[in-house]
Image: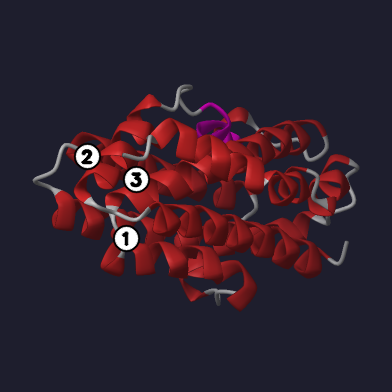
Amino acid sequence: MTDARQLVQQIRRQLKALDERIVRHPYLEALELGRVEREKLKVFAEQQYHIVGSDLRSVAILFARHGDLPSRSYLFNLLQGENAAAEALKEFALALGMREEELKASEPLPQAHGYCAFVAWLALYGSDAELAAGFLVNFAAWGANCGRMSSALKERYGLAPEAIQFFDLFANLPSGDQPALAVIQGGLDRGVAPALIHRAARLLQGYELMYWDAMAKAAAV
C-alpha cells in the first residue's frame, strides 16, 4: 500500500526545480524593485478574480461529488478559504481604483487561466486526493510568493493593510500537511493511482509557472 507522506515527499523532490522557478520568478523581483507600474497591477487583480471565482465553484463541485467521504471537512475548509479570498480580492482591486463590475468585464488571459481550468477539470473528473496533492504542493510556492507581494505592495506601492488581505491570507495558511495527507491517503486506499496524484501536482505547478509568466509579460518586465 502506497504511503501518502512518502508519495508527497517524492513529488516534492521531483518538482523542486519547477518550484524554484516559481518562487524566484522575475515578476516578484520586478515588483520588489517597484518596476511594475501601478496600473499593471490591475491585470493581477483581474486574473485572480476569474481564477478565485472558478476555483470556488470547482471546490464546491468536488465537495458535492465527495461529500460522503471523510475528506468532507477538508473540502469545506477549502471552500471557506476560497470564499474569504474572493472577498479580500475586492479590497485589493478597490485600492487600485477598480470596482467589481470592471473585474467582471475583464478578459481572462489564456496563459493565466490554465490553472483554474485544470482545477475545474479535477473537480469534474479527478478525485479529492488529486486536488489535495496539487494544492498541498502548490500552496507552498503560491503562499511564499503572496508573502513577497504583500511586503512589496506595502513598502513600494503604499497599499494599506486592508488592501493586501488577499495576499496575507495565502501567505499565512495554516501550517502542517496532515489534513491534505489524510485526504491523499484516503484516495490511495480507495484505489486512486499514485501516478494520477503525481500528475495532478505536476500539472498544477506547471500552470502556476505559466500564471507568473503571464503576469511578467503583461507588466513588460
Q: Is residue 214 left or right of residue 134?
A: right
Side of 1 where 70 appears, left or right: left
Q: Secondary structure at mark 3?
A: helix
Q: Is residue 164 magenta?
A: yes
Which residue corresponds to the image point at 27% horizontal and 46% vertical from the top-left?
Answer: 187
Q: Which mark is residue 58?
A: 1
The residue sitting at the front extreme is: 1
Looking at the rendering, the stretch of residues picked out in magenta corresponds to 163-172
Disc 1/disc 3 C-alpha distance (Å):
12 Å
User: Mark 2 — residue?
Assistant: 71
Residue placed most toward the observer, 63 or 129? 129
| 75 over 201 or under it: above or below | above
Residue appearing at x 48%, y 53% in the figure: 198
* Location of residue 44 in the rendering, given as x and y in whole percent from the top left corner: 64, 58
Residue 157 falls inside the magenta stretch: no
Helix, strand or loop under label 2 = loop
One can see residue 70 in this view: yes
- Mark 2–mark 3 contact, CB under 8 Å? no
Quickly name the residue at label 3.
Answer: 83
Question: Is label 1 in contact with label 3 (beta carbons under 8 Å)?
Answer: no
Q: Where on the picture, by quarter, is residue 101?
A: bottom left
